[in-house]
Image (tube, rainbow, N blue to C red):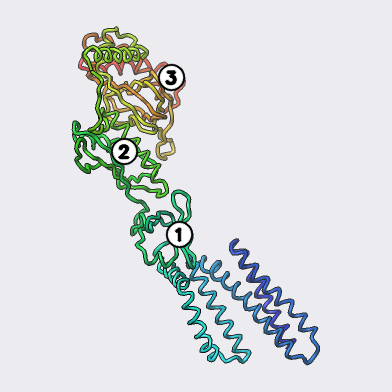
Amino acid sequence: MEKFWLNEAFWLTIIVVLSVMLIVWRTQHERRTLRFAGLSFILYFFGLPLVLLLPPGTSTGVRVVHTLGLVLSGVALINLGSLLVFEVLLPVIRLSLPRIVRDTIIIAAYGIAIMSLLTSLGVNITSLIATSAIVTAVIGLSLQDTLGNIMAGLSLQLEQVIEVGDWIKVDQHVGCVREIRWRQTSIETRNWDTVVIPNSQLMKSQVLIYGRRQNAPLQTRQWVYFNVDFRYSPTEVIECVNLALQNNPIENVARDPLPHTLVIDFKESYCLYAVRYWLTDLALDSPTDSTVRTRIYFALKRAGIPLSIPAYSAFITEETRKRKERKEGKEMEHRLGVLQRIELFHTLTREELVQLTHHMRYAPFSKGEIVTRQGAEGHWLYIISTGHVTVQVASAPRDGSPSIQKEVTQLGPNDIFGEMSLMTGEPRAATIIALDEVECYRLDKEAFQDIIAARPQLAEDFSHILAKRRIQLDAVREGLSHETQRIRIGATQNHMLELIREFFGL
């Protein structure tokens, strides 16, 4: 018996050592299970000296020690075997089983090992099972809720109806699934609270899984509502808001499908609209809604479309003619002061500047919005009143890789941009992006038509300033030296002068 014990211990030691080395090499997880298996084997191994110390002929003592050794070695082998299969073998073939299935298989292995051990000791398994059936029935009745939760958890993981990472709604609770255990499922809400739901309740309730579709990215539809009164046509409102949302990407808002605006209902004194977009990060619904509302606000503000005022609001200020003229005069003086600080308009007379003030339109932009895009058509000149923008040009690397945006400069209050397109009709030469909340005034071609027609010599003054700004952009794209820039300015000015004269019909 002792020789058999020694032979068994030798081969078991080799198997355990090789298994531990392979597990440690392939995975850094499940250290707790590995330590438990190692402790079981150490206790088994320490039984070997005990057998050798027993007096000769004590077969009963050897048998007892050997039985305990079988139990300990069985525990060690089952735990090591589970680690080899679930942490080493299955990841190699890219197969993953739910945790609850793994636990079930291990429990079944323990059951088979116990029955085999009892059989080897001469225990009648049939009578034992018959006797334990009554006990099992009593226990099952007393623990039916717990067993129901366990079976529900097993079903959830086997069918993979709900997976860790899913955003779900159960009754009034909405959250991300963080853990599915034997008895319960834990979800983390957007308030960073954890809700523990019994698995049996989860199986009986109606569960909404957000954003899950077949062969499609994870995203869910959001609605943002706003009101505009009936003085403005739905076509005008929808076009204005769609342009602001679709031309400028918004973080966590899907580009396919694009966000769009719908007319939802007609109320007593206003029209109810909604922006419908698809959210890509389900944890950031409120911050993304806020960004979309900000875009809507500034888009309507630029278009001169106010959000509706409730019908029950009343204004009691008497708007006299004298008060109205005073307000308009104050605004015109402000606009005149803005124009007088612009280099492009230094050669204009006061009367000509006053004439331009009547064509100035208020145009605000929110942070991150693209004001103008390189290559786009546009006959507007923008004057910055408050805020800052970045001027970027797309430069194509010489190795043929995709073009990259490079910042040329930043502009602030009293700076202008878009003058090239306004004066010559050429496409936009740069992309302008708002760095913060920006308030601008914009002027169109019509504002300058009569002034340049009355004083054609202004075209030469404008062409010089435009040529200088154009060469500054070229210098960034092409890396021009100061001497090359100076030479190019003269030729560019002549070209600009021809374009201005042609564009304005001089």
Give the residue at mark 1. 164
- Name the image quarter holding the C terminus: top left
Give the side of residue 479 with respect to residue 128, left or right: left
Mark 2 element type: helix
Q: Amino acid at mark 3?
A: Thr
Label whose residue precedes the other's in the sequence (3 or 1): 1
Q: What is the distance, in whole Å, between disc 3 and disc 1 at their CAs?
A: 62 Å
Q: What is the distance, in whole Å, between disc 2 and disc 3 at their CAs?
A: 42 Å
Q: Amino acid at mark 1?
A: Val
Residue 484: image tag:
3
- Name the image quarter holding the N terminus: bottom right
Give the side of residue 279 with respect to residue 7, left or right: left
Looking at the rendering, which quadrant does residue 377 occupy? Answer: top left
Q: What is the distance, in whole Å, between disc 1 and disc 2 at their CAs?
A: 33 Å
Taking depth in this image into account, of 422 and 433 the one nearest to the observer is 433
Looking at the rendering, which quadrant does residue 30 occupy? Answer: bottom right
Q: Residue at x 35, y 32 (%)?
A: 370
| Residue 502, visible in the rendered structure | no
Label whose residue precedes the other's in the sequence (2 or 3): 2
Residue 242: image tag:
none
Looking at the rendering, which quadrant does residue 5 occupy? Answer: bottom right
Give the residue at mark 2. 245
Whether the residues at callouts 3 and 1 have beta carbons within 8 Å, the answer is no
Mark 3 element type: helix
Q: Amino acid at mark 2?
A: Leu
**Discs 1/2, front:** 1
Whole-percent x, y for residue 186 in the image: 47, 59
Whole-percent x, y for residue 486 in the image: 42, 16
Vertical relation: 404 (above or below) 5: above
